[in-house]
Amino acid sequence: MQLAEIDLRREGPRLRGQPAEEVLREVVRAYAPDVALSCSFGGPSGMVLVDMLARQDLLNDVEVYYLDTGLLFEAAHEVREEIEQRYGFEATAYLPDLSVAEQAELYGDALWDRDPDACCGIRKVGPNARALADKRAWITGVRRDQSAQRAATAVIEWNAKFGLVKVAPLSGWTEAEIWDYIRRHDVPYNRLHDEGYPSLGCNTRCTSRPLPGESLRSGRWRGLDKTECGLHGNT
């Protein structure tokens, strides 16, 4: 059975109990070519989803995209190039309307320190809206174990913010299960994970290494009352 927007109430509960590979297969078959996978080339979940799509010969039916904020870690570009070569595709880059220099000219230097929500809006939320403007389904690597704010993440649901179906096939996976998959299938991943960064943001200025005992995302926006960039959950 193929999926359509009108079937979410009926089919959602069934899909929530399916393996991630099956969720991906049904969603891509129903929505292609109007389906996209957002991949930061920072977190390991995105790498797993790319591999799952490739193993099912579905990668060519999905637009894999990333938000090139102009402040990404160089390691993100490195693993993107490695992933593209490994799986034979090219990820689409969506850039902000303003360069980092133009943003500084309009709003002052280091907006991410003074008004991080505004910075995320310019450098992430705006480009993401453009990436999804002509799509009907959005696949993400968001998981419930990543933070309290993401604990209620559904496998599939309607996303009013961007006006399409949002799919999180790995929402019920744990960090350990993600890394077990990566090791079993020899999936490339961002080298900074081996250097003490379990969670990487889109901005080198907003990401630090968590201290011993801290949560995975505690190094994001350290010292600020902020836990999300605005793409998922609260800003």
Image (cartoon, grey):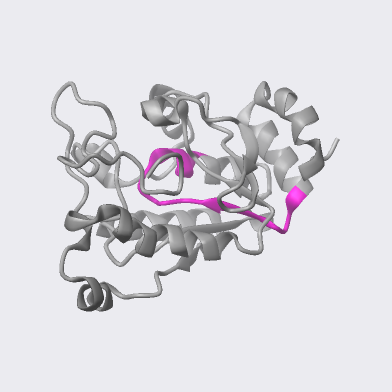
Q: Is residue 59 left or right of residue 175?
A: right
Taking the spot 36% from the left edge, 29% from the top edge, the residue there is 147
In magenta stretch: residue 140:
no
- Residue 159 seen by the camera: yes
In the rendered image, residue 6, in percent from the top left (x then y), is placed at 81, 41
In the rendered image, residue 139, in percent from the top left (x then y), is placed at 58, 45
Number of numbered discs visible in the structure rendering: 0
In the rendered image, residue 206, in percent from the top left (x then y), is placed at 21, 50
Residue 102, quarter of picture: bottom left
Q: Which residues are magenta?
A: 31-48
In magenta stretch: residue 45:
yes
Quadrant including the N terminus: top right
Taking the spot 53% from the left edge, 43% from the top edge, the residue there is 140
Quadrant including the C terminus: top left
Foreground of the two, 127 or 46: 127
Foreground of the two, 122 or 28: 122
Foreground of the two, 214 or 85: 214
- Residue 85 seen by the camera: no
Q: From what the image shows, is residue 207 above or below residue 133?
A: above
